Amino acid sequence: MAGIPTSRDAGRFGAFGGRYVPETLVAALEALEAAWNDARADPEFNAELNACLRDFVGRPTAFTAAPRLSALAGGAMIWLKREDLAHTGAHKINNTVGQVLLAKRMGKKRIIAETGAGQHGVATATACARYGLTCEVYMGSEDARRQSLNVFRMKLLGAQVHEVNSGSRTLKDATNEAMRDWMGSVGETHYILGSVVGPHPFPTIVRELQSVIGVECRAQCLEVLGGLPDVVVACVGGGSNAAGIFAPFVTDASVRLIGVEAGGRGDEPGQHAAPLSFGSPGILHGSLSYVLQDPEGQTSNVHSCSAGLDYPGVGPEHAHWKDSGRVTYETVDDREALEAFQTLSRLEGIIPALETAHAISAAIRLAGQLSSDAHLVLNCSGRGDKDVQEAMRLLEARDKNA
Ligand SMILES: *Cc1c(COP(=O)(O)O)cnc(C)c1O
């Protein structure tokens, strides 16, 4: 009711965010928020997390000049923040080790997670194996079929994989199932959400854990460039790698922040996965943000060549950054991403994830509009080993149609 504060008012980014969940989860989310605030203030927790990030994840990750990519773009110098070098090959591990340590501290012995392509499931199973927690991962049966190697990886790491047969049998349905599990098991179970989405406090916890990317990167810029960069570019699925690199730069007004969504096959509904570019405010998975939906509020189908960007929602803080004008969001389509995937491989010896390739394409475009004394930082969110087979299929299809 208007004027009366409710738990829905917790964790707002402007009008976005909040906590749109069944009553049974409110107490659990409040306990999680309290435990997180307590952990963040405890030097012992921070020391354990930092040691894990250094010794297990391999941080700090490198900050690498990309001279041949810069020459191609013909403008700003492009720099890469190398999350592809983190353990398991992407930024997702920063979040999962942090939440596993938090779960341990809360005395929870069982971890559940949702996964789409399987990358978050693998990162969660990895952290659980490292710390000896039980891990169960929900995955749509259609995704499990398409990503059978990741299902095998999770099982190797000791996790149990539950295939979900409802709805479109993809990420959205796996998330619903994980939330349902948590409602019945919250006493002994922690739910590790994979991006800056979901009800409060998840968007804040995940952004704070991923901010290690931006904190390191900002220090590396000051050391290597002698100042702040002009532009920071990152791809946006749920928005965690972007939020992680953007957050420490948000108060630096001189730094332009650019998020890149999946333009897919085109602008028509169902052909892309770009809620900030084409969506409208709505509630998905417990929070208010931009959502791809039809006029009746039914969540739309999405498409992207990269499984990690293939999600109809986005983190609420991005919705706020969009509306306040602090971050600009663009789209890059499948064709452009595939080309950038090849370009970075050939010019810099780094095979990027297809998600990352979206940011690379936008970075080339942007750098070309800037002068040669400008610096552009690109968050290289992950490596492309997981995507080479799909890229081979897409490139063969493209070249046959050419
Ligand atoms: C999962 C993933 C993404 C998308 O997720 P965000 O939460 O938007 O960061 C991007 N890049 C890679 C390599 C991924 O694995």
Image: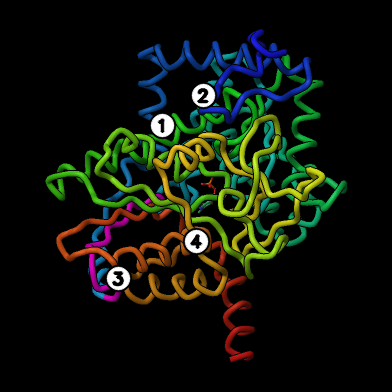
Please identify, in this view, whether the residue under mark 4 or under mark 1 is nearer the observer.
Answer: 4
Percent across and percent down for residue 241 are 46, 45
How many neighbours does mark 3 have within 10 angstroms: few (below 14), some (14-19), or many (20 or more)? many
Quadrant placement of the C terminus: bottom right
Which is more foreground, mark 2 or mark 4?
Answer: 4
User: How would you rate the neighbour count of disc 4 (Cα within 10 Å): few for under 14, some for 14-19, many for 20 or more?
Assistant: many
Mark 4 to mark 1: distance in Å?
A: 24 Å
**Residue 324: image location, x then y, percent:** 44, 37
Q: What element carries label 1?
A: helix
Whether label 1 touches label 2, CB < 8 Å: yes
- Disc 3 residue type (three-letter): Leu
The residue carrying mark 4 is 353
Q: What element carries label 3?
A: helix
Q: What element carries label 4?
A: loop
The amino acid type of the residue labelled 1 equals Cys
Q: Visible in this render: residue 352? A: yes
